Amino acid sequence: MMQWNKPKSVRQIGEAPGRERIFMEDYVIRFARKLAKQSRGGERAAMLLGGTYMNKNEKIYQISGIVEVSGFAEREEPELSQKMWDRIYTDIKENFTDLEIVGWFYSWKGFSAADVSTLLEIHKQNFQHRDKVLYLFDQKEDEDSFFLYKNGQFEKQEGYFIYYEKNPEMLAFMERENNRHVHIIEQEDDRVIRNIRGVMEENEKKKQVMQQKQKRESRFGYSLGVVVALILIVLGVSALKNQQTLGEMKVQVARLQELALGNESMESVTTVETMGSSLTKMTETPAAVDAQASGAAVSAGAVAQP
């Protein structure tokens, strides 16, 4: 192992009682957490790059680089495919020099005992020298932790160290990744904009169809209103005529009733003229006239009797 030069600016997180020390550069932690947030609850993995050193009987893991494991969530078995490993080594060669794989990073939303055993199997299948670091980030709890492989199991580390120093390779890698991510976002934005435009055009077509339908319904409603108005006018005129006709009929019936009553009165009344000292007109009923006639006849008979 090479001689270790301790970073000048270091911050300790938690306690580190054992003989192992984990030092992770600030940019690496930022990049790892950014990957976790981008996963939106899904799995995300990366390889941790750096070196291992011995310092006063302490084993030092110094991590100063990181590359993502592309397609990790789509794997079909614990062991990574050759294609995935080729991509990992290509990224390391293009972005980092004199760094080796010292561990791996894994992020997911929530963990269980079964998940830990799965991670242990992945660790065994992919690292021949299993004395590697596992940097774990729980998206649900927003917490991170470190594990070391010992005696066939993962042993959680009580603490670790964050160090700050110039790291031009990691900074340049992050800038390239950010630009690539921005390009992906721009493509996604273009896709979103196209979808929005498509929705707007579809809504505009629906709006035009609706307007045409409303115009047709408006014209039909206007025509129907005109027809209804004409019908009402005709019915009103007819009703007016009927009322006039009914009124005329009522007048005619009244006249007929008057005529009938008038004839009946004429038939039941007799006019008698009596000669006296002056001409006098008397109106009496036929029964009275007959009675008077009978009385006159009796008087005449009485006078003529011897």
Image: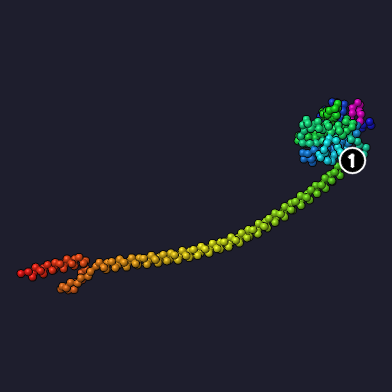
Q: Which residue is mark 1?
A: 86
User: Amino acid under label 1?
Assistant: Asp
Above or below residue 290? Residue 141 is above
Above or below residue 291? Residue 6 is above
Q: Is residue 222 left or right of residue 296?
A: right
The outermost residue toward the right is 2
Q: Picture quarter containing residue 90? A: top right
Q: Is residue 37 left or right of residue 129?
A: left
Q: Position of residue 111 (x, y in %)?
A: 77, 33
Q: Nearer the viewer, residue 171 or 195?
A: 195
Q: Position of residue 263 (x, y in %)?
A: 29, 68
Q: Position of residue 115 (x, y in %)?
A: 79, 32
Residue sitting at x 83%, y 31%: 120
Residue sitting at x 86%, y 42%: 174
Magenta range is 53-62
| Scheme of colours in the image | rainbow
Instruction: Bin the neighbour count of mark 1 within 10 Å (Cα to Cα): few under 14, some 14-19, many 20 and up.
Output: few
Q: Is residue 210 left or right of residue 245?
A: right
Q: Which quadrant of the figure contains the C terminus?
A: bottom left
What type of secondary structure mainly makes up the magenta span? strand
Q: Position of residue 18 (x, y in %)?
A: 85, 26
Residue sitting at x 83%, y 48%: 183
Q: Does the stretch in magenta take in 61?
A: yes
Residue sitting at x 38%, y 65%: 250
